[in-house]
Every structure is written in structure tokens, then in C-alpha cells.
Amino acid sequence: MARDGIEKVFVQLPVDHESGAPTLEWILNHFDREKTKIILTPYCGDTDVNKFQDVSKTNYIPRCAMEKFKVKTLIPNALENYQPTIVELITEHGMNKLVTTGDKVTISETSKVFDEKLNLSCKIWFVNKSDGKLVSTRCYDPGNAEMIAEALVENEKLKKKVEKETIRREKFEEKLRSMTEQEKINKKEIDDLRQKIALSNTITFQELKQATQNFSDSLKIGNSEFGRVYKSTFRGRTVAIKKFKSQSKLDLEVLKREVAFFSILMHPNLVTYIGACLEPPALVYEFLSRGSLHNYLNNAGNTTPLSWQVRTRIIGEVCEALIFLHTNKSNPIIHGDLRPHNILLDANFTSKLRCFGLIKLADRDTDNYPVSSTAYMDPDTGKMTIKSDVYAFGVLILHLITGNSRFITHSEIVKEKIENDTLREIIDKSAGEWPLTRAKELAMIGVRCANIHKSERPDLVHDVRPIVKHLVKLSNKIVHERGVSSSDQGRA
């Protein structure tokens, strides 16, 4: 650590900022802003220095500044190969902490550097660039050969485990793809495959009892029509554990479907499935500290109003999650119960859809809506379809703009306000000074999506996403320019 108490943490990032964002977010969430200076440096092999400098100025540096981290960029002379790059960063720039991507090539090439240069010291965190989760940690210290040997053994085990899991998933996906290409597809076999691969993540009831202190009320954070939800620490991470009220056949069938789907569905705006216990039925999934969007729209508890920038970003994130579900390679998936209760927020106000017990395959007969979501129910069919998800998305947009549930099922009122240039009258004032032109664009999308006739609703991929992405980009630019911290993003 430097004399001023500030330690430098180097991070290798790509010129594609969307690919680098998860790694950078991991650093921002795991290091102390008061004691850390982030040094941005390009990936080995990314030789377009000017492009890296540009993306750093427009994306990486503003994001760090928003979280109030000290930050600067550093371009090594050697970028073509791993060894000269790592050696230069350590010997010439004093690097002793590095965060980089956790893909197999980077881990392997980095290991070779320290195997050949045993006099180098550095602690390295390898982070998955897709979901921003830690893959492994390695501490290279020439003064402690025993620790190095133990780390190598542990990492070798981890590498084999990852490779085995990757092969298993690839085989499954390949078989699934080949099956879906057949004219007459065997749906039951697909379900059996999904369930088989999912059951590898089964959790014992004893593990859950231990994690929840025998389902103590002190750890309970919520009730639902299906059961109770507990906050706990499980296998080293904070999780939510949903224990079903009964062991009825319906509950078990719902749970099996959850296990099957969420073992293969991964997206930054879907709640991450961790595992399940089948008897008695329970689900384990990631815990999101800020709770549901419903709480913020209804001022429940100690919540503060969400700013218009955050609301815009939530609209963009929900749009991406729905597109991911609707364009799933094997079968389009319908969410079926999109509403504020099922949108959870993490510490940075990133939104994630909670889908447990509700998703449906689009090419099957779908059930009626749950009773609890009639306000978001498609009036054209009363059934779950992809177009009904689009309708619910439109209702959500209008709810976020107006903050008033009176308008969410009366899109014609909003449409009239837009046409008469009086939209400002119904915009939620607690969201701050929402630029009228941008609020109008979003409101128009909301009205189109919430059209009572499903045939007239827009396509999310081609008609909605381009506009929403542009509006999100503009709102993010304002946040970066003002230097708003993550803890302040929810305030108006």
C-alpha cells in the first residue's frame, strides 16, 4: 500500500465497453473507494490504443467517477503478448493487484507468466466477463512456495470442474438445437433433458435448514401466496430462499419447471437461479438488497422516489430481459406476470425480472393470468402470449412515468395528454425534472405497447429497443456528467 494509504488496483478491460462493464462493476462493488485507485489498462492483444483511450473517457472513467473512485488509464508498451505485458506492469508500474477476465485463455496464459517468472508477486482476480462473477483468485508470491503449490492444485481442480460443466452444457445445447430443427419435435424429451440437467443443482433440505436457522422468523423477509421467503448466506453468498407452503403436486410441478428453465437461462436482468430442494419444495436465488419496484412506486417502507434517469434505465433493462426470453433459441418464453412486484432492484438500482412459477413456452397452450396481476392482464385474450408481455411492458412504462396506477389501465388518457401537449400534468413529479421530449417518447411507446388490440402492438426488437436504448444512453450521459453515486441514483 502507498504511503498515503491508497492502493492501486489494475484492471484489464476491452475496447468494447459493454463486454468490460461486468468486470468493472465487480471492482466497484468489492473495493473501498476511499483506499483504492483504479488503473485502467487494455486487454493483452487489444492494440488499438486510441480506441481504448476513447472508451475509457466516455464510459469507464465516468463510471468510476460516479462511484467516487480515483481512476486513471495506463497503456503498457507491450500489448501483443501476455508475458511482456504482465512483466512490464509489475516491474515498471508497481502492479501487485490485478483484476482481469476469467476465460480459460487468460487464466492459462497468465499462469504461464508466473510459472516462468517465479520472482514476480501479484494477486489476481479472474472475473467472468459475461455476468461479472468471480471465477477464481490467485496469489503469486515467490516467498511462499507452499502457498503457490496449494493455489495451483486448487485452481487445477476448479479448471477441471469448469471444463466438465462447459462440456456438459454444450452437449445439452447441441442436442437441444438438433431436436428443435426437426419438423416433428418431441416436446417431452426436451423437458426431460432440461430437468435432467437442472437436477444437478439440487440442494438438500438439511442445507436449507442450516442456512435459515431452521427457517427462523428473524430471517424471514416476505410472504407470498406460494410460501415464505428468507434471507440467508448460502455457500458463501447472500441469497433468498423461497420455501413453498405445501408439498402439493402443483407446487412440485411448478418447482420442477423452475429448475428446468433457470438452469439454462442466464441474463443480467433476470434473477439468477442458484438451486432447488425438491422435497419439501424450495427455491434458492440471488438476493437483491433494494427489494421490489412495487415498494418504490408505492413509497413502502423507507424507500425514496426513483429519479427519472433510473426509471428510464429500468425500462431499458426490462425491455432487454423480455427480448431475451422471447427470442430464446430453443423455445420462445413468455414471462406472463410482468408487474412491479416481480421486478427486483439491486444495490445499484439495476433491475432484474423475477419469473419463478410463471414462465411459459410460447408454442404451448398457456394458462390464464394469476389473479394478482389483473391490472397488467392483456384485455385482448386474457391468456399468456408474447403480445401479452408487450402489453404488460407498456403498462409498466406508463406506471413509471406517471407514478399513478389510475393511468396504467387507461392508456387512452395518456394518449390524449400527449396529443394535447399536456403530458406534464400527469408526469410523476417525485421523479425530478423529466425532460418533456424524452418523457413523451417513452409515453408514446407505452401507449403503443398497451394497445387493447394485440395485432397493433409493436415488436420489441425492431420497433421498441432502438428508441429505448437511445433514451437510456442519453439519461446515463446526464448521470455520468453530474457524477451521481449509486447510493443517490434512486433519489429524485
Image (cartoon, rainbow, N blue to C red):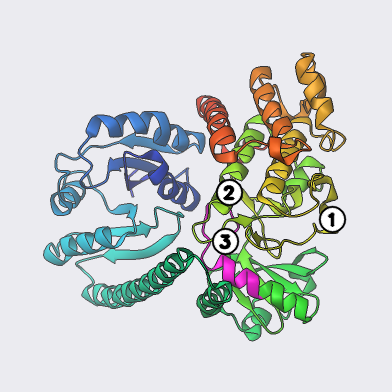
Q: Is residue 471 above or below residue 383?
A: above
Q: Amino acid at mark 2?
A: Ala
- Segment colored magenta: 256-271
Nearer to the camera, 296 or 336: 336
Asked where in the image residue 148 lies, by quadrant, the reply is bottom left
Q: Is residue 419 above or below residue 226?
A: above
Task: Identify the residue at horizontal 20%, vertical 39% (top origin).
Answer: 47
Specify the quadrant that holds the C terminus: top right
Which mark's residue is nearer the viewer, 1 or 3?
A: 1
Nearer to the camera, 15 or 1: 15
Task: Identify the residue at horizontal 43%, vertical 72% (top origin).
Answer: 172
* SS label for mark 1: helix
Residue under label 1: 372
Camera sees residue 267: yes
Camera sees residue 349: no
Return the residue found at the far right.
406
Residue under label 3: 272
Q: Is residue 263 magenta?
A: yes
Q: Amino acid at mark 3?
A: Thr
Which mark's residue is nearer the viewer, 2 or 3?
A: 2
Residue under label 2: 321
Q: Is residue 74 magenta?
A: no
Q: How far from the left and from the top, in percent, is residue 378?
A: 78, 46
* SS label for mark 3: loop
